[in-house]
Image (cartoon, rainbow, N blue to C red):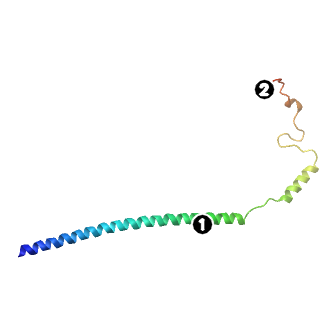
Amino acid sequence: MAAGISAVGWAIIAATTATSLYSANQSSKNSKKALAQQESAQSEAKQAALAQEKAADEASNMQNMKSPDTGAMMSAAMMSGKSGVSGTMLTGAQGVEKDKLNTKRSTLLGQ
């Protein structure tokens, strides 16, 4: 009869071990699934935060938009017109000398 109890004991130990292994395997799967969900949630939160930051920056830029001072530009243009002949930054007030314009070639495109 001791052998019968021993076999039942071994069966109980085997069943308990199998149940424990199954439970550990399920726990591992559940923790991997939870980790993946947490990483996904963090990624979504980061994207939302970046979008919100960009929207706030754009709103701030719209609020602080600069406009040109047309009055000062017109005043500067009128003052330069009163000073006489004006040149460009490239030529100056005297313009380009005539001999600099002549390339002394009679062919097209310098050939």
Q: Is residue 35 above or below residue 80?
A: below
- Is disc 1 placed on a helix, strand or loop? helix
Q: Name the residue located 44 percent from the left edge and 66 percent from the top edge.
A: 37
Q: Quadrant of residue 22?
A: bottom left
Q: Quadrant of the N terminus?
A: bottom left
| 20 sits left or right of 68 in the view | left
Q: Quadrant of residue 47?
A: bottom right
Q: Quadrant of the C terminus?
A: top right
Q: Is residue 79 above or below residue 25?
A: above
| Distance in Å between CA atoms under marks 2 and 1 | 60 Å
Q: Name the residue located 83 percent from the left edge and 27 percent from the top edge.
A: 103
Q: Crowdedness of circle 2 by 10 Å Cα count: few (<14), some, many (20+)?
A: few
Query: x%, y% of residue 85?
Result: 92, 44
Instruction: Name which residue type carries label 2.
Output: Gly
In the image, 8 versus 43, the foreground residue is: 8
Query: x%, y% of residue 53?
Result: 60, 65
Q: Name the residue located 18 percent from the left edge and 69 percent from the top edge.
A: 14
Instruction: Name which residue type carries label 1.
Output: Gln
Indicate which disc residue 99 carries: none
Indicate which disc residue 52 carries: 1
Query: x%, y% of residue 40?
Result: 47, 64
| 88 sits left or right of 17 in the view | right
Mark 2 vs 1, N-terminal side: 1
Tag 2 and tag 1, C-beta contact below 8 Å: no
Q: Crowdedness of circle 1 by 10 Å Cα count: few (<14), some, many (20+)?
A: few
Indicate which disc residue 110 carries: 2
In the image, 14 versus 91, the foreground residue is: 14
Q: Is residue 51 above or below residue 16?
A: above
**Numbered-mark total:** 2
Query: x%, y% of residue 52?
Result: 60, 66
Determine the residue located farthest toward the left in the rendered image: 1
